Structures are given as structure tokens and as C-alpha cells.
Image (cartoon, rainbow, N blue to C red):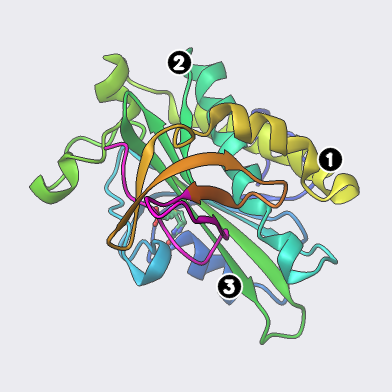
Amino acid sequence: MNTPLFEREAPVLFEERVDSTNLYLRRIADTAADGAAVIAKTQSAGRGRLGRGFLSPEGGLYLSVLLRPEAEPERLLTLTPLAAAAVCRAVETVCGVRCGIKWPNDVLLGGKKICGILVESVLGGVKPCVIVGIGINANTPSFPEELSQIASSIAAQTGREVGLHALAAALLREFDALYDRWLSDGGRSVLAEYRARCLNVGREVLVGDRRGLALSVGDDYSLLVRFPDGKEEALRFGEVSVRGLY
Ligand code: BTN
């Protein structure tokens, strides 16, 4: 179903409740159009990175997009920063506040995580595809104690309710535009924006149990970290996560 707010070639499906929008698209992957998106009001089994769950009560925006790019796995990794940049742009347009990115893929507002991104490759089916899942804590009413230190909602940070429809429409618009460019430039055009938004650079990070200083973001979106022994390591996207900032 396409509504005037969602003017795009590929379809946008709306669901009240799903297990996970990523799983939903995975189930229809063989027949779904390139670019098909699904938006759900709530998820019963939201999936996060590194096998974690993603809290998905009503009030949040849970959206996934299915893509069929012909690209090396290495290049697919750059869809994550692309999605993060699209979220930042959409939140800025709709809510008027600037967001930053915690490497590799959390979007932060007021020092708290307001969005998580999970990009998954589906290789087993008839047609391989990539599913980009984005969860935004837009008006999420509350967080369990253990999450409230690190996570928040846009509404809590700004003091204003977010229009979910407007946010979803802006997000798909920004995502589609950045993805169009990605198809021709392989993600290079997002690099400058990602660097400008990356909050880790110049700050201490915790990599496993090692402390280091984040120096810069490389051309492949790796995070260059200097450790106390003077050694420098480029942490590769998708392989490690870093702590710090919260
Ligand atoms: C993370 O922060 O660990 C990533 C969270 C990704 C959550 C989104 S919500 C929409 C999509 N469906 C899922 O099950 N996960 C992603």
C-alpha cells in the first residue's frame, strides 16, 4: 500500500504487530520487490546486533527495507552507516534536533541511544538480498532500569511527541536518496557525513576490556584506536563493538 506520504516505487507495508520486521521481510524475500519496506507499530521479538533483542513497545518506529544490490559482502557493510546517516537526517528534519552516531551504528541524541540498526544478508533463498532494519525510540514510553542508563526516546529528549508517520516518511525518503547514490558510489558519499557525526573520535573507547583513544574513521568506516602501549588498530565494522560515551 502506498499513501501520499510514502511516494516511492517500491511498496511500503504496514503491520500492527510482527515478531520482527527483519524476519517478516525474510519470510517474503523470494517474492518481495527490491526496496520493499515494512513498518510495524510493535515487535514481539525485535532483533538487535550480536544476538541481542531490541525492545519494541508501541511508540517506537520499527522499519525494515529489503534490497537486492549486486555488491561484494565488504561493500554491503557500508549500508549500516548509510542507514545511520538517513536516521540522523530524518530526525533532524522532523524533530529539529541534531543527532550523532556512536560507532558503528547507534544513533544518539542527548548522549543516549535513540536508534539501533541491524543489517542482515539473506543468502539461502532463491534470490539473495539484504535486509536493513531500523528501530527508532521515537515516543517509547519507558525503558527497563538496565537500559535507561544508555537508551532514551526522542520524545523524552526533546519534550515533544514525534509524529511516527512523518518520521517514517522522512526516513524512507532519506534512505532511498542515499541508497540511490550508494548504488553508484559504493558508500563513499556518506563517509564525510558519517565522520562529522561520529561521536567517538577524540574520546576514550572500551574495546573488550582494553581502553583506547578513538583517533579517526577510516575510508572503510573502520575506527582507528590507539591503545596505551602506543599500538594503533583499525576496528572493522561488523566485527567488534566499543563502549564509552554513555
Ligand atoms: C541494535 O541496536 O542492536 C540493533 C537494533 C535493530 C532493531 C531494528 S527494529 C526494526 C528491525 N527489526 C528487528 O527485529 N530489528 C531491527
Q: Secondary structure beneath disc 1?
A: helix
Query: Is the CB–ligand 1 distance for label 1 below 8 Å?
Result: no
Q: Position of residue 19 (x, y in %)?
A: 38, 66
Magenta region includes residue 30: no
> From mark 3 to mark 1, how far is it between C-alphas?
25 Å
The residue pinned by badge 3 equals: 26
Region of the chain picked out in magenta, as a range: 226-246
Give the amino acid type for the residue marked by disc 1 in the picture: Arg
The residue pinned by badge 2 equals: 97
Magenta region includes residue 239: yes
Query: Is the CB–ligand 1 distance for label 3 below 8 Å?
Result: no
Q: Indicate which label's residue lies in the foreground, 3 or 1.
A: 1
> From mark 2 to mark 3, how far is it between C-alphas?
33 Å
Which quarter of the frame holds ligand 1?
A: bottom left
Residue 66 has which mark?
none
Give the amino acid type for the residue marked by disc 3 in the picture: Arg
N-terminal of the pair, mark 2 or mark 3, is 3
Q: Position of residue 144 (x, y in %)?
A: 12, 48
The residue pinned by badge 1 equals: 181
Residue 71 seen anywhere in this rendered image of the structure: yes
N-terminal of the pair, mark 2 or mark 1, is 2
**Considering depth in this image, is 17 or 244 the residue closer to the camera?**
244
